[in-house]
Image (tube, grey):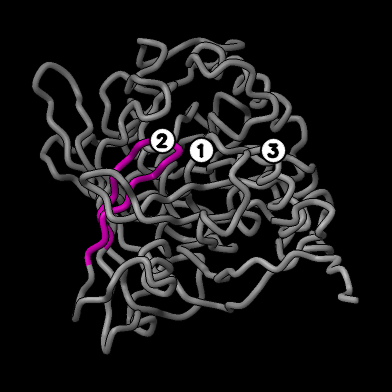
């Protein structure tokens, strides 16, 4: 008599994408319905515990992210990228946002999974971000039919160097809310604080650091200890979510929150980005695009903090806790600021592969 299996094995890749990491799955290897899918991802990452002791999460919001890939049925795209943000300490999964750092490894993962054939010396992969509808072109170094991971490109927040992955983001303005400025204003007054509510790659509520009683140059540790600051901006974020048409966002990571301060390390502007219940250790690729768009938009909360570039494309260097990130923005100013595309360089690395196990009581296909 066969022994009944008590766990379900699911094939996966474990990869670092930019300054995030997590499991990458074929969408077809996971349950179709969202409720069961959420339970599987919670079990896989160990969500619901501060160090994710019963899963492969790393006790931080940048290490409890999940990417799910499939061959796209879209005429333009090669690969559909479906993202999930799994909470660290609460057993919650948010399918609303996307993640640009995890997207950095979508191209390599698609090749590793056999979903895309490698073409030397660079494989260009067209990716559709299912959560937001954004289109992204990824250029991945390849040789002998495989991904090249070693190289000389360094990104702040990741030790060492690796092969560059060039990303070009298209159709990211208004992807989640339908509008570049979802409230119709470049600034809204929320709880006495001026906020720019913007939807570029990731809906964000952006304020000046000094208006919230901080400098904007604090370390991650200093900010995470500042419970009064977190409580104040969370109240603003929740109200901003309503104004942006996102509904009740108390249990959603969207919109994200960010603060700005004048640059102090030679960049364009200093910024701190929140996930939103912890400070991001570096800078999100999607959030970085939204902040860069805010910086370039006349009338936003960035006014007076910089000499605003007027020629397109313009490079916006965002100073973050671990260094800086460059965002190359293409835009036009005919009749007002209009975001067109953004380019970034990231790196990725395959860390492990095999099967991840979840209790069969949760899901047994």
Q: Check contact, mark 1 vs mark 2: CB within 8 A.
A: yes
For this view, does 81 lie left or right of residue 74? right
Q: In which quarter of the image is the C terminus?
A: bottom right
Q: Is residue 177 above or below residue 8?
A: above
Where is residue 174 shown, x and y percent of the image? 34, 26
- At a point 34% along the width and 46% down the height, the residue shown is 128
User: Which residue is label 3 attached to?
Assistant: 35
Local crowd size for mark 2, using a 10 Å CA cut-off: few (<14), some (14–19), many (≥20): many
User: Which residue is label 2 attached to?
Assistant: 132
Q: In which quarter of the image is residue 35?
A: top right
Local crowd size for mark 1, using a 10 Å CA cut-off: few (<14), some (14–19), many (≥20): many
Q: Check contact, mark 2 vs mark 3: CB within 8 A.
A: no
Element under disc 3: helix
Q: Majority secondary structure of the magenta segment? A: strand
First reached walking from the N terminus: tag 1 or tag 2: 1
Q: In this view, does 294 lie above or below 82?
A: above
Pick the residue in front: 276 or 63. Answer: 63
Q: In which quarter of the image is the N terminus?
A: bottom right
First reached walking from the N terminus: tag 3 or tag 1: 3
Where is residue 158 shown, x and y percent of the image? 50, 70
Magenta-drawn segment = 124-138
Q: Is residue 351 above or below residue 144?
A: above
First reached walking from the N terminus: tag 2 or tag 3: 3
Residue 97 tag number: 1
Element under disc 1: loop
Element under disc 2: loop
Where is residue 97 shown, x and y percent of the image? 51, 38
For this view, does 199 lie left or right of residue 52? left
CA distance for labels 3 and 1 = 17 Å
CA distance for labels 2 and 3 = 20 Å
- At a point 35% along the width and 19% down the height, the residue shown is 181
CA distance for labels 1 and 2 = 7 Å
């Amino acid at each position: 008599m066969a022994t009944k299996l008590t766990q379900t094995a699911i094939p996966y890749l474990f990869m670092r994408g930019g300054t995030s990491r997590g499991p990458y799955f074929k969408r077809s290897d996971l349950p179709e319905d969202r409720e069961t899918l959420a339970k599987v991802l919670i079990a896989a990452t160990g969500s619901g515990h501060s160090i994710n002791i019963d899963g492969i999460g790393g006790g931080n919001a940048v290490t409890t992210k999940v990417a799910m890939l499939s061959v796209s049925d879209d005429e333009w795209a090669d690969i559909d990228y479906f993202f999930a943000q799994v909470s660290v300490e609460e057993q919650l999964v948010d399918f609303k946002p996307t993640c640009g750092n995890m997207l950095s490894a979508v191209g390599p993962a698609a090749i590793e999974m056999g979903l895309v054939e490698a073409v030397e010396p660079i494989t260009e992969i067209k990716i559709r971000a299912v959560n937001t509808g954004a289109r992204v072109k990824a250029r991945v170094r390849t040789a002998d039919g495989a991904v090249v991971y070693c190289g000389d490109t360094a990104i702040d927040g990741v030790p060492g160097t690796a092969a560059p992955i060039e990303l070009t983001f298209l159709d990211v303005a208004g992807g989640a809310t339908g509008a570049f400025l979802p409230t119709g204003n470049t600034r809204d007054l929320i709880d006495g604080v001026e906020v720019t509510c913007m939807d570029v790659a990731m809906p964000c509520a952006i304020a000046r650091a000094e208006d919230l009683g901080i400098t904007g140059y604090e370390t991650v540790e200093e900010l995470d200890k500042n419970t009064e600051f977190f409580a104040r901006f969370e109240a603003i974020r929740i109200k901003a979510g309503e104004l942006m048409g996102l509904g009740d966002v108390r249990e959603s990571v969207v919109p994200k929150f960010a603060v700005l301060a004048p640059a102090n390390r030679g960049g364009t502007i200093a910024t701190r980005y929140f996930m939103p219940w912890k400070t991001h250790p570096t800078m999100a690729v999607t959030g970085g695009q939204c902040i860069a768009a805010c910086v370039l938009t006349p009338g936003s909360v960035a006014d007076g903090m910089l000499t605003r570039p007027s020629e397109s494309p313009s490079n916006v260097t965002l100073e973050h806790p671990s260094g800086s990130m460059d965002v190359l923005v293409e835009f036009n100013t005919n009749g007002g600021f209009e975001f067109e595309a953004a380019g970034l360089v990231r790196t990725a690395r395959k860390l492990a592969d095999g099967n991840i196990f979840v209790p069969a009581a949760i899901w047994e296909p």
